[in-house]
Amino acid sequence: MTPPSLAELARIGLSWQPSGQAALRGPLLGLAEECDRAFVRLAALWRAEEERHPAWIAAERLQRAGYLRSFPHQAAFAARLSPAEPDLDAFLAGPVLDRDGVLAGARLAPVSQVLTPAACYHVFSDRLGQELAGPRFVTTRNTCFRHEREYLPLRRLSGFSMREVVCLGTGADTAEFLRLAREALDMFTGLAGLELDWRPATDPFFRPRENPRYLLQRVDPVKHEATYGGDLAIASVNRHHDHFGTGFELTLNGGPAHSACLAFGVERWLFALTDRYGTDPERWPALEPLAAKVCAELGGGPA
């Protein structure tokens, strides 16, 4: 089947801007919410606790994970105009915007906040310095922001919705979490009629061959993506070892906690489902009951 055109997606609720921003309404918004309800239902396999976090995170907290040195090209910042009156007067005295729509003559206040690049960072940041009594499972959804070289409707956005399930525990806890996550996702996508391939992947480091973390990921793959159509990652499983436990001083049994996550890109699921089933909502599968069936089959959480 040929992927739906932008005009066809617009008819079911997509408003697209070339800057990589997408607005959803109508049937497409309904499908996005159905996807997220299904992902939350899958999180019941671990009885994961739901959390909500803000749209940005302190740069100091984020850098505990080395994000700004590894991904400076993707970082987006929460900035404001300098509050000093002379700076505001100078800004107002000018054109405010230039012909390209860029702020003209703007002096910014010191930048200390980064727009959320991945939902899981807040889970670690909010537990800074904690000692865990045992494994913890959390699920959270956030709007995430990343600069990219190009943007494509639903496939690659500058701001997108990410649902994650995060495991904090021992190395054995995270290994078992990832095993079950892959089994559950395989079963769920099979029921939903989506054919996916698992592929080892690396994070999009800046100048990767100069970054020791990239080289380590090549030697010991810790990220595996579930790809649709050969190249579109709609979900991933990620084993962090004790990277975040060390960075955020999270301890368990006297040492750094390990962590892992299962991540879903909501808009990319919209692409995969409309590519597979078309733009008629009557043809779309009911995903939440399928996720409940997976939970019942695998014996985790309320079905």
Image (spheres, helix red, strand yellow):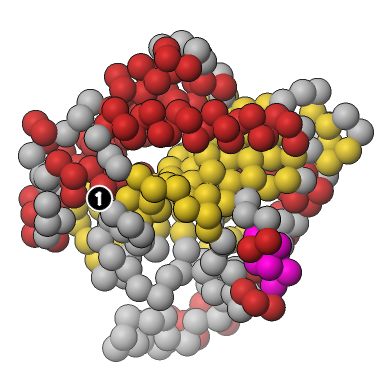
Q: Which residue is mark 1?
A: 271
Q: Which residues are magenta?
A: 211-217
| Residue depicted at 42% across the width and 12% down the height | 296
Residue 31 location, quadrant: top left
- Would you say residue 83 is visible in this rendering? no
- Residue nearer the viewer, 194 or 284: 194
| Residue depicted at 32% across the width and 81% down the height | 101
Q: Position of residue 272 (x, y in %)?
A: 26, 47
Q: Residues within 10 Å of mark 1 (few under 14, many from 20)?
A: many
Q: Image quadrant for the C terminus? A: top left
Q: Position of residue 113 (x, y in %)?
A: 61, 60
State whether the magenta stretch is mostly helix, strand or loop. Answer: helix
- Would you say residue 17 is visible in this rendering? yes
| Residue depicted at 65% across the width and 77% down the height | 209
Q: Position of residue 93 (x, y in %)?
A: 42, 86
- Residue nearer the viewer, 250 or 203: 203
| Magenta span contains residue 199 | no
